[in-house]
Amino acid sequence: MSFRFPSNEWIVELSRLLNESPSYESSAKDWEGDFVFVVEPDDGFAETAYLYLGLRHGKSTGGALLAAPDERPTEYRISAPFGVWRKVIEGELDPIQGMMMRKLKLDGNLMKIMRYPKAAKEIVSCCADVPTMWPGN
Amino acid sequence: MWTFVSPKIVFGEDALDELLSVPIRRALIVTDRTIRELGLIEPIADRLGKIGATWEVFDGVRPDPDVPTVLAGADAARSFEPDWILGIGGGSPLDAAKAIWVLYERPDLQPGEINPFIDLGLRKRARLITVPTTSGTGADVTWAIVLTDPVEKRKMGLGNRENVADIALVDPSMAAGMPPRLTADTGLDALTHAIEGFICTWHTDMTDGLCVHAAGEILQYLLRAVEDGSDLEARTRMHHAATVAGLGFGNAMASIAHAMGHALGSTFEIPHGRAVALALPYTLEFAARETSDRAAVLAARLAISAKPGEAGTRALAAAVRGLISNVGNPGSIAEAGISREAFDGALDKLVSDAENDTQMITAPRSPSSEELRALFTTAYDGNAVSF
Ligand SMILES: [Zn+2]
């Protein structure tokens, strides 16, 4: 089974995989702070999508596709065009390098996030583990 | 897409004379007391005098600079209002100078907020010149700023590409007086930059050649510089190699040895270069067990070994261990003078600090917490890595 990106099913699956990852759990054991991933339109995807991911104390408290970004207030928001997200999920773009080149934009307390580089890496590797189906395929 | 940043680099004998053609009116010199006592400010001050510049010295930088230090430096800058900031020293004063410059330009920021993901908008009030007095850190040409969090005793990896210096004056005479131990520690730091810059996952076509060249030079000249400080050829080669390694790893990243070395440094106050080099061979062996062939490729380019994979990596690790031992540096945490009791007591913190170090992001093989614990233990005992 594969999950269309971006969709409610996809972010729910990511949340489930995080909860199965002992290395995510140990690297984020003190983490508190939810995310919204904003998927902006480009040639590959015509709409804007908001994916909510709840993260607390090494576990994911859930994932959901939101109708609007402020439907659930979150501490962090990462925005990028669809094609950039696809590169991140397929492991072609390191999201931290992407942020340095301003391809992904982060809103939120960066000082806190910089203290958890391993957790960030684990989330990215879980993203790559979600069997993903792309629009148009 | 990726970028390569560098100051204008003026190097070799009389590089300091470049100061005579820089339009400096008011210079804030950021340094430490040792550099001042060694008389290393004088050749700078002489030249500033010749061009009619006014200057003031902030010499409050201590080894492993912390947040209060750079805040005090930024206060000094705000009251003196320099149009140039001159960082003079080893890694600590140079990193402090970068942070002080950013905070002088951006009083709205806290030191911990200096990160690569924002636009700083520097160079409105001042510009930065760096003058390295050791041959190791490469901080003269990198944009990284390492500050110590004094409460948690943990090193914070900060910096932004904009805060790279405008001009680096790489004059070998400024490092010619280093005692042997400092020569060894800082030279091994440069070797670790060259090797980790080459093997890390952010290495690029623009950085590989710099790392190979620097590693070769250091393997060839460091021992000579340590054994005979008056060997000017060795001194000059080492001074240049440190800056070349800085350009290489500074535009890529470092890796696990720096993450482990930062943890060892802040926990046991082991000097930076001594700590990272000590960790390096173990981390190379660890990476080669599973993923990367990069260390073997480097071994081949350095004509150390033509064997691929683990065999080539072990040959490179052996060459590093050989140099560490020849310059009289510790090859294990035990040899660095840390008691078993102190090590055991600190192991949890070492593991958690290292795994949350920014340099860990670019590890060719990411260790789990258990593997990191095993790496520290193996590095304590001085055994070869077999996991
Ligand atoms: Zn270093």
Image: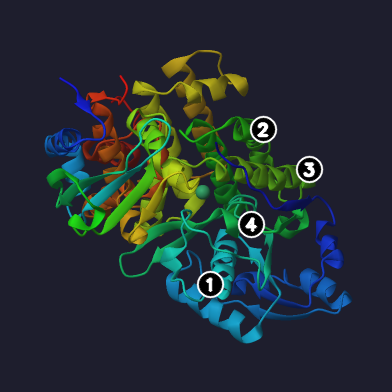
Answer few, some or many: residues within 10 Å of disc 2's Cα (few below 14, many 20 plus, some between 14 and 19). Answer: some
Q: Secondary structure at mark 1?
A: loop
Which residue bears the numbered disc 4? B179
With B243 as the anchor, is A75 left or right in this view? left
Q: Amino acid at mark 3?
A: Glu
Colouring method of the image: rainbow
Answer few, some or many: residues within 10 Å of disc 1's Cα (few below 14, many 20 plus, some between 14 and 19). Answer: some
In percent of the image, x 65 and y 30: which residue is there?
Answer: B209
Q: Chain of mark 4?
A: B
Which residue bears the numbered disc 3? B233
Q: Amino acid at mark 2?
A: His
Marks 1 & 2 on one chain: yes
Q: CA distance from mark 1 to mark 3?
A: 42 Å
Q: Chain of mark 3?
A: B
Q: Is mark 4 within 8 Å of ligand 1?
A: no
Which residue bears the numbered disc 2? B213
Number of disc labels: 4
With B251 as the anchor, is A102 left or right in this view? left
Q: Chain of mark 2?
A: B
Q: CA distance from mark 3 to mark 4?
A: 16 Å
